[in-house]
Image (cartoon, rainbow, N blue to C red):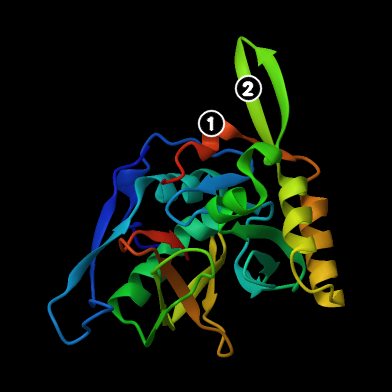
Amino acid sequence: MSADYIQPILDPEDPEGPRVQAVLPGRLISYYYKFHPVNYENLRAAKFVLEHPKRLFAGIRAFNEGGWCFTGRPETWHIREDVTAPFPANLVFAVYLNSRCFVYEC
Amino acid sequence: MEKHFLSAFVEGTERESPKPWYNPDGDCIVYQFGDEAIVADRVDEILTIYRSVETGKSIGYQIKGVCALGRKFGRDTLIVNCRQDREELKEISLCWLLLAAYEDGPKTIGRRQAYSDALEYCGPHPRLTTRDLDLVPA
């Protein structure tokens, strides 16, 4: 399994304060790379959104305490493994983090 | 194309065919059989359908709050099969999980269609071993 990747992000509980660390878990990196190359490529877009979020949301799950959703709009994304396209104007790219700031979906 | 910032993290990793996966960080089961960009279509607090951004067709699903579902319906009742294959292997039926989740919410046409889609995709991979779920935090 891959190692975890650490990404500094705005503290969702204190966006004006110092940055905190989000974790891109190695198991998610491996899973995307092994089974979903497009999602693996779009981890670039996820990194961009974590670095340049437009909106942060809380209370995203009915059955799990805490957690965050960072949304933003990358300029481009992958629609196939080797095909990039402008990110659609009517969508936002969402990155979901649990209460420990571990990314679990994007 | 610019080198991927995670390329060193996946060196030596082999590509495989998609199969359902329990993600302990999200307490969710995900399965996506098409490798293309997706839009997540939230059906309810348990089910999200993945749709192709190009065609709008459903190409996978996410079952959220698996741990909570196990508590609610009884984890033991989810285990539908045991077999001896060198070691005891217990499995959880994804169809059972989806049906229980469907019955627990409003019976709308939209939900029925979405759960029907998800059930169809369970066909090739109807079960997860409980070993996969042992990572669920207490």
Q: Which residue does the numbered mark 1 point to in the structure image?
A: B131
* Mark 1 closeness class: few <14, some 14–19, many ≥20 residues within 10 Å: few
Q: Residue at position x 35%, y 46% from top? A: A26
Marks counted in the figure total 2
Residue A55: x, y in percent?
39, 87
The chain holding disc 1 is B
Among the two numbered marks 2 and 1 on one chain, the one whose residue lies closer to the N terminus = 2
Residue B127: x, y in percent?
70, 38
The image shows residue B12, relative to residue A5, as above or below, that is above
Of all residues, the one furthest to the left in this rendering is: A18
The image shows residue B134, relative to residue A76, as above or below, that is above
Q: Residue at position x 84%, y 76% from top? A: B108
Q: Which residue does the numbered mark 2 point to in the structure image?
A: B89
Residue A52: x, y in percent?
31, 81
The type of residue carrying mark 2 is Leu
Of all residues, the one furthest to the right in this rendering is: B109
* Mark 2 closeness class: few <14, some 14–19, many ≥20 residues within 10 Å: few
Q: Are marks 2 and 1 on the same chain?
A: yes
Check whether the beta carbons of the residues at disc 2 and disc 1 lie within 8 A of each other.
yes
